[in-house]
Image: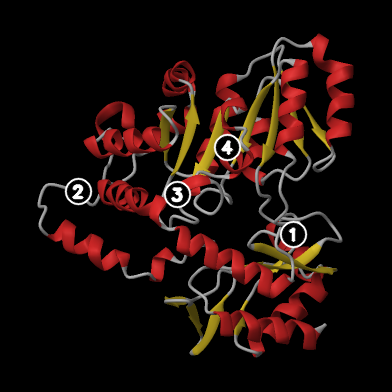
Amino acid sequence: MMREELERLAAEGNLRHLPQIEIEGAYVVSEGKRYLNLSSNDYLGLSCSGLHREFMAQMAADEAFLLSNPSSRLITGNSPDYTRLERKLSAMYDGKAVLVVGCGYMANTGVLPAVTRKGDLILADKLIHASLIDGLRLCEADWKRFNHNDVEHLERLLEKYRSDYRDVWIVTESVFSMDGDRAPLREIVDLKRRYDTKIYLDEAHAFGVYGPDGRGGAAETGVEDACDVRMATLGKALASQGAFVVTDALTRDFLVNRMRTLIFSTALPPISLRWTEFLIDRLPRMNDRRERLARYVERLTGESDRTHIIPLMAGENRRAIEMSRRFREAGYWVMPIRPPTVPQGKARIRISLTAALTEEQVDNFAELCRSIG
């Protein structure tokens, strides 16, 4: 069965392999060739900023911290580093309760199954991340999908089903990971208030990049207080490890007791928590990186309202693979994105701009895009 499935994937141009690569600053090295990295989620360019040297110099003087944390948070893994980091994140989010978890996948598969139950309904955008879809499948609540960013379709579903359920959750992302577009958060919040629902917002690709101090899309659009649960990752714009949930104190306590992906997972190592804390202290002062990234987006696309995630649509899998090959021949590391990551017929190249690039590099890539067509 496995062999036949792999052969089918190969015939469809959909067989994946783990690339053997090394990272050198803004570049990827693979099979002896150096490529400019345009596939990284390190949106602020922090992994090649030199900050790690400053951090490691601080850690060298501290003999107390551990490189590992071989237990769950509920047993022996809840180190003081968790407490300090959660307090700083809470202060960043105006005193809201914060819970740090191992990764965004754990948050997205763990929160909704914990806070919903039979008799509840979840209405989720059709293009939410696979981790959220897996979370929906674990829920005892009913769930339905609304057309991508279609608030009229969402309202029709609310009109039809709201009275049949106890609690209704609306699930969306502030910046979508594959199309790079934004959710209509203000309109969704209007529906939340009219129909008495709750909002779960995935800020994985907005945290660090948008909003005051990099707090994300909800802060940028002024709807933070309307979001019941916000999730953000620490392994993208912050170039660290883990994720966190922003919510109220009651919900945080409930998650500690009912969120299986937290309860049954090994805690993060203190060195990762301290690296995150080190960067959180500096994140409000990174406006220059956020502004630089915005300039690069406009230089490449000619549009000021686009995000740093830019899809180059191919349609068919083999077309996406061929586009990726041509870009790599020209010295750019960009990867084909194919089903099931995106719907059938929606294969594309996904460009991720980062603040680690230069204007010359962005302009050269834009010229190559025009020549390739």
Whether the residues at callouts 3 and 4 have beta carbons within 8 Å, the answer is no
Query: Which mark's residue is nearer the viewer, 1 or 4?
Result: 4
Q: Residues within 10 Å of mark 4 (few under 14, many from 20)?
A: many
Q: Nearer the viewer, residue 47 or 129?
A: 47
Q: Residues within 10 Å of mark 1 (few under 14, many from 20)?
A: few
Taking the spot 58% from the left edge, 43% from the top edge, the residue there is: 203
Q: Earlier in the sequence, mark 1 or mark 4?
A: 1
Amino acid marked by disc 3:
Leu
Amino acid marked by disc 2:
Leu
Q: CA distance from mark 3 to mark 4?
A: 14 Å
Which residue matches tag 1? 5
Tell me the element at label 4: helix
Instruction: Report the side of 108 relative to 3 (left or right).
Output: left
Q: Nearer the viewer, residue 226 or 64?
A: 226
Query: Which mark's residue is nearer the viewer, 2 or 1?
Result: 2
Taking the spot 10% from the left edge, 57% from the top edge, the residue there is: 61
Q: Quadrant of the N terminus?
A: bottom right
Residue 286 at x, y = what percent? Answer: 42, 58
Residue 231 at x, y = what percent? Answer: 54, 38
In the rendered structure, find residue 234 and report the number of the disc placed on it.
3
Q: CA distance from mark 1 to mark 3?
A: 34 Å
Residue 221 at x, y = what percent? Answer: 64, 40
Q: Earlier in the sequence, mark 3 or mark 4?
A: 4
Amino acid marked by disc 4:
Asn
Tell me the element at label 1: helix
Q: Is residue 72 visible?
A: no
Instruction: Report the side of 67 relative to 1 (left or right).
Output: left
Which residue matches tag 2? 66
Whether the residues at callouts 1 and 3 have beta carbons within 8 Å, the answer is no
In the rendered structure, find residue 108 and report the number of the disc placed on it.
4
Residue 99 at x, y = what percent? Answer: 42, 31
